[in-house]
Image (cartoon, rainbow, N blue to C red):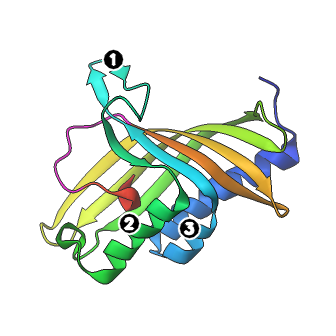
Amino acid sequence: MKAASIEQAHAAVTVLAQEALHLDGQRWDEWLALFTPDASFWMPAWTDEHRLAQSPESELSLIYCTARASLEDRVWRVRSGLSVASRPLPRTTHCVTNPVVTQADEPAALHVESSWTCHVFGLKQRSTHVFHGRYEHLLRLQDDQWRIARKKVVLMNDTIPTMLDFYCI
């Protein structure tokens, strides 16, 4: 893969940082605006100790959204209060580290791999948990802005002690 320019790498890292801050601040509209309309969001399940599901269409996924509209539905459930598991929402802190930005195979697109942690404080249980893993983002230049066209979340500690949704991964 060809390395991205310094300007492209800076822009990509900024998008990932904005995403983390929007999630932590529960600024859902700003978070959704980072995604292209056709963006996919996928968190594959582990099929055994060392193998992830390879296809969201034919294997188990922990989360799979095929477009931003699916993410909008998830946000609507959180905002509406109808998601009992999300009431009250936990406090979160996302940390995104070790980004590697390369040119994607398609024009005006960047591939970003990074590591992440999300510290989650559950208000009901008064408990803390840390989810962690790797991200793969495909960013596309759209209207002079870098947007998330695809996000893959690899959750390394998938023995989940509490609820799990988009805001804590």
- Mark 3 lies on a secondary structure that is helix
Q: Which mark is residue 74?
A: 2
> How busy is the neighbourhood of tag 2: few (under 14 within 10 Å), some, or many (20 plus)?
some
Residue in view at x 16 percent, y 48 percent: 161
Label 1: which residue?
Answer: 50
The answer to which of 165 and 5 lies nearer the viewer is 165
Label 3: which residue?
Answer: 32
Q: Nearer the viewer, mark 1 or mark 3?
A: 3
Label 1, label 3: how far apart the Cα atoms are: 32 Å
Magenta residue span: 155-163
81 magenta-colored: no
Residue at the extreme front of the image, as rendered? 57
Which mark sits nearer the N-terminus, 2 or 1?
A: 1
Q: Is residue 20 left or right of residue 26?
A: right
Q: Position of residue 147 (x, y in %)?
A: 69, 57
- Mark 2 lies on a secondary structure that is helix
Residue in view at x 38 percent, y 42 percent: 132
Q: Is residue 70 above or below residue 59?
A: below
Q: Nearer the viewer, mark 2 or mark 1?
A: 2
Q: Position of residue 160 (x, y in %)?
A: 20, 45
> How busy is the neighbourhood of tag 1: few (under 14 within 10 Å), some, or many (20 plus)?
few
Residue in view at x 27 percent, y 54 percent: 164
